[in-house]
Amino acid sequence: MPDDLFSDLGDERRREAAPLPSRLRPKTLDEVIGQEHVTGPGGLLRSMAEGRLRSSIFYGPPGTGKTTVAEILASAAHMAYVPLSAVATGIADVRKVADQAKSRWGLEGRGTVVFLDEIHRFSKSQQDVLLPFVEDGTFILLGATTENPWVSLNNALISRCLLVEFHALDSEAVERVLARAWDRRRAWWRDGTLEDEVLSQIAKRVGGDARMALTVLERLTVLADGRQTAHLTTAMLDQVWKDFAYYYDAHGDKHYDLASAFIKSIRGSDPDAALYWMGRMLKGGEDPRFIVRRVLIHAAEDVGLADPQALLVAHAASWALETVGLPEARIPIAEAVIYLAMAPKSNSVVEALAALDQALDRWPNAPVPDSIRDRHYNPRLKEPYRYPHSAPDHFLPDPHLPSDLEGLELYRPSTQGEEASLKPRLDEWRRRRREDKR
């Protein structure tokens, strides 16, 4: 009995030492905020809580309640709950948990919920180890990921699990989470006060992450403990926020979302937005070489021949980064971003390549016409080659494609920027080739 008392005391002290998001974790689905599409009446999670629990993959942004819901479902199903992190778990750990789950069925007559956080960090072979245990009901698997499960998880695992999407919380939902925490402040802090805008400002800054919002609130109270008055202000929030402002997962979906926003802002000719997303990525610790690679690609893909200088400007930014590094290279990178955003746009090169792929599929082995074959190894070719530089305007209407492909037009100039001047020239050359053939 004394051992139990000491154990209970230790658990209580551990809970008191836990971060605020853990201490205030909801205990029922009714307390979960922002996921009403699955926790409300008729929602998938509500149905599982009231009926049979199934192996599932929870996917969505951080701080949206995936871990919380897993604990709630395990409790509602009266099952043992085993939390694991894919970062620190190996195949041997999974098999050990599976053996314990089998024993639990025999000794206690109840099942086990295995919550595997960051399941996308399991390799394909590690994911395969889970399959037989999910298949035969050894344990219920609840996996959580911030990435697209169709990309990061095995199809075999997905086919055995329900997919449940958790939505990013809007600022109103985050503010409700904060308001509830503040109403209960005597249980985790003391009876302090705050300026009217503090909670709403936190909610607007955390990007839908309720866990981060509660952590910021807790950090504010710690800062207030070192002062004479227990009053939280927006000035204190500005001070604390410096540690949180540029949180960035360089390997998760946020990385791809910001990169997508960056390149689409350039394509959309919005230099202000393009600079903002560039700044977000750099401040968050993104590899600057990734950014300049995207700039190089965009210069050819979306500006193209409408402004041939764009590729040179992009290359110069890449060269500057390798030569002087950050922070100085931030200036030429920004110059390239502004230049590309302001440049006329054309994707004619990309469209020409798409047309080329179709032509190659249709005519993969068309012969080279005699007139343009190499004469060094075959001097007896009858069809002569005519030298364009000896003709007026350095142009001859001679064909350069096999007879079956004559008239093939892969490149279609746009009417944007410098490319607009290419179209009349190309139209004239194509016209003369058609007429010469007739």
Image (tube, grey):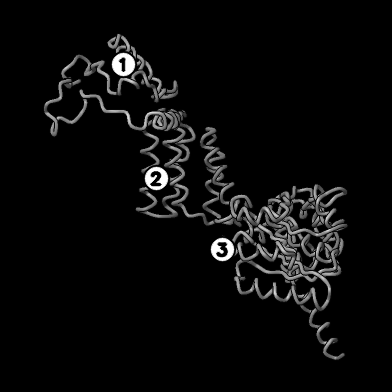
With 10 as the anchor, is 303 left or right in this view?
Answer: left
Q: Position of residue 176 (x, y in %)?
A: 82, 53
Instruction: Classify mark 3: residues with Cα within 10 Å, few (<14), some (14-19) or many (20+).
Output: few
- Disc 2 crowd rating (10 Å Cα; few below 14, some 14-19, many 20+) is many
Secondary element type, mark 1: helix
Residue in the foreground of this view, choosing between 76 and 379 = 379
Residue at left offset 72%, top offset 64%: 136
| Mark before the other along the chain sequence, 1 or 2 | 2
Mark 3 vs 2, N-terminal side: 3
Is residue 338 left or right of 261 when viewed as pictured? left
The answer to whether the residue labelled 1 contacts the one labelled 3, judged by CB atoms less than 8 Å apart, is: no
Please give left or right for residue 324 compared with residue 381 in the image: right
* Above or below, comparing residue 174 to residue 306 in the picture: below
**Nearer the observer, 300 or 156:** 156
Which amino acid, by three-letter code, is at mark 3?
A: Ser
Say which label, 1 or 3, has the lower sequence index: 3
Residue lying furthest bottom: 2
As drawn, the label of residue 429 is: 1
- Report the mark closest to the observer, 3 or 2: 3
Residue under pointer 3: 125
In this orientation, does residue 236 appear? no
**Label 2 amino acid?**
Ala
Disc 2: which residue: 317
Query: Can you tell which quarter of the image residue 437 is in?
Result: top left
- Going by the numbered disc 1, the residue's amino acid type is Trp
1 vs 3, front mark? 3
Q: CA distance from mark 3 to mark 2?
A: 41 Å
The secondary element bearing badge 2 is classed as helix
